[in-house]
């Protein structure tokens, strides 16, 4: 299937590579089908573009939180577990959506810590886990320090 995208032009999408978010994403509940796009030639890219197949102009930059020094231990409700089709732990990927913010005329890219994406990589179904508050079960590490 060919999809016209804002960022990448015409992209060929293998139907077997479509990730479905049955509830959509926060503020984009009508967009349910996505695919991952990354720079060609990189086997382990540091970030991906989550491209909507329902709205070609909608794409999110996402990253594995461990590359930023975060480690999530998320508890899923029975409803969330059912939506993800009861995946084995090794079939789950947690990703953070990056966003651009500006302060004092300076732009910065930050991860959305309170609403990570949880994806069953085997069934290719996901959800956005919105957390009211950050809990102490998020581990932070300082990647710039030798400590």
Image (cartoon, rainbow, N blue to C red):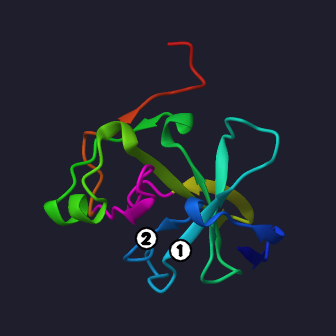
Q: Write down the residue under mark 1.
A: 33
User: Relative to 35, is 142 above or below?
Assistant: above
Q: Element at badge 2?
A: loop
User: Relative to 94, is 25 above or below?
Assistant: below
Of the numbered discs in the image, which one, if any, rests on residue 21? Answer: 2
In the picture as drawn, the residue positioned furthest to the bottom comes out as: 30
Residue 49 pos. (x, y %): 66, 59
Q: Determine whether, in the image, residue 76 is placed left or right of residue 7.
A: left
Residue 106 pos. (x, y %): 73, 60
| Segment colored magenta | 112-131
Residue visible at 49% across and 42% down?
Answer: 65
Residue 35 lies in quadrant: bottom right
Residue visible at 14% across and 60% down?
Answer: 78
Sooner in the amino-acid sequence: mark 2 or mark 1: 2
Q: Nearer the viewer, residue 65 or 11?
A: 11
Q: Which of 131 and 47 is in front in this view?
A: 47
Residue visible at 65% across and 52% down?
Answer: 48
């Amino acid at each position: 299937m060919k999809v016209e995208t804002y960022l990448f032009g015409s992209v060929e999408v293998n139907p077997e590579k479509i990730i479905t978010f049955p509830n959509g994403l926060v503020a984009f509940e009508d967009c349910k089908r996505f695919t991952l796009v990354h720079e060609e030639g990189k086997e382990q890219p540091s970030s991906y573009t989550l491209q909507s197949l329902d709205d070609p102009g909608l794409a999110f930059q996402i990253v594995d939180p461990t590359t930023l020094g975060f480690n999530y231990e998320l508890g899923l409700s029975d409803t969330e577990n059912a939506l993800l089709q009861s995946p084995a732990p090794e079939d789950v990927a947690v990703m953070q959506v990056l966003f651009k913010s500006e302060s004092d005329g300076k732009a910065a890219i930050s991860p959305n810590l309170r609403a990570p994406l949880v994806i069953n990589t085997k069934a290719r179904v996901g959800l956005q886990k919105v957390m009211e508050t950050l809990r102490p079960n998020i581990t932070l590490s300082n990647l710039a320090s030798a400590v």
